[in-house]
Image: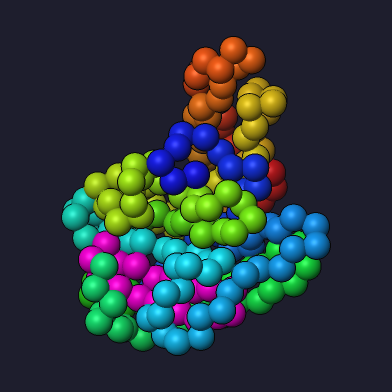
Amino acid sequence: ALGSRFLGAGQPLVYVGWDETALWVGARMPLPPGYRARAQVTDRDGKVWQDDCIEVHVDPQHSHATNYQFVVNALGTTLDALGGDPSHNPQWLAAAGDEPGGWSCELSIPWEAMQTSRPSAGQVLGLNIAVNSSSLGGILSWSPVLRALHEPARYGHLLLADSLAAGVLEFSSADPGHLRARIVGTGEALIRATLSARDAQGREQELSVDATALEAPGE
């Protein structure tokens, strides 16, 4: 959660891909039984962040200073901004769907929308993906930002690969030796996950797991 080193109770599942035309993001946000996503804003560049939504923040040159922001709520309403300025209105696509048990969305963000040319394999981008959720504890942030989502110096590293992709599906303090990962492609990837947890006395401790994922596809 934003401003915390601790995981929220429910974790969205996010996929990121790329090709010569765009950065692609797909996500599914879980909801408690009986809940539906809360979203009311229907105007572009409205207060979409107040709804259940997903935010994609990109620093395409990994300069630690630039923040392109793309937001879509559970109705499919979008907001885009550059450095917090919503007058930046590039062309990009987003769609969303809401159903019992969760809502999902897909985003296609052309490289031109971030005023950059097509990157090459091996390039690293700054990235943060955040979920604003009325039922999951507020704002969930993938990167360890401290006070706000507009902190590109603290964004995570997105390595663009052309033969192998890897990601963590599950890592829990209840069983820190168990890490589920998914890889697609061929080769191997080192996956390192660190989780902060509190013991019965309220003392904070860090749990770390290293795993090597081999020849995919699989988990």
Instruction: Choose between 206 and 124: the one closer to the eye.
Output: 206
Task: Please report the residue visible at 46 percent of the width from the left and 34 percent of the height from the top.
Answer: 5
Find the magenta span and give its range.
67-83
Instruction: Choose between 217 and 76: the one closer to the eye.
Output: 76
Where residue 189 sits in the image (x, y, percent)?
51, 39
How has the structure been colored for display? rainbow
Which secondary structure dominates the residues rendered in magenta? strand
Task: Please report the residue visible at 65 percent of the width from the left and 23 percent of the height from the top.
Answer: 177
Q: Is residue 82 above or below residue 75?
A: above
Q: Is residue 179 above or below residue 15?
A: above
Quarter of the rendering occupied by the C terminus: top right
- Residue 75 on the magenta segment: yes
Q: How many marks?
A: 0
Task: Please report the residue visible at 35 percent of the width from the left and 54 percent of the height from the top.
Answer: 149
Q: Residue furthest top?
A: 201
Where residue 205 sits in the image (x, y, percent)?
51, 18
Q: Examine the rendering and report whether any part of residue 19 can be seen.
A: no
Task: Please report the residue visible at 46 percent of the width from the left and 73 percent of the height from the top.
Answer: 48
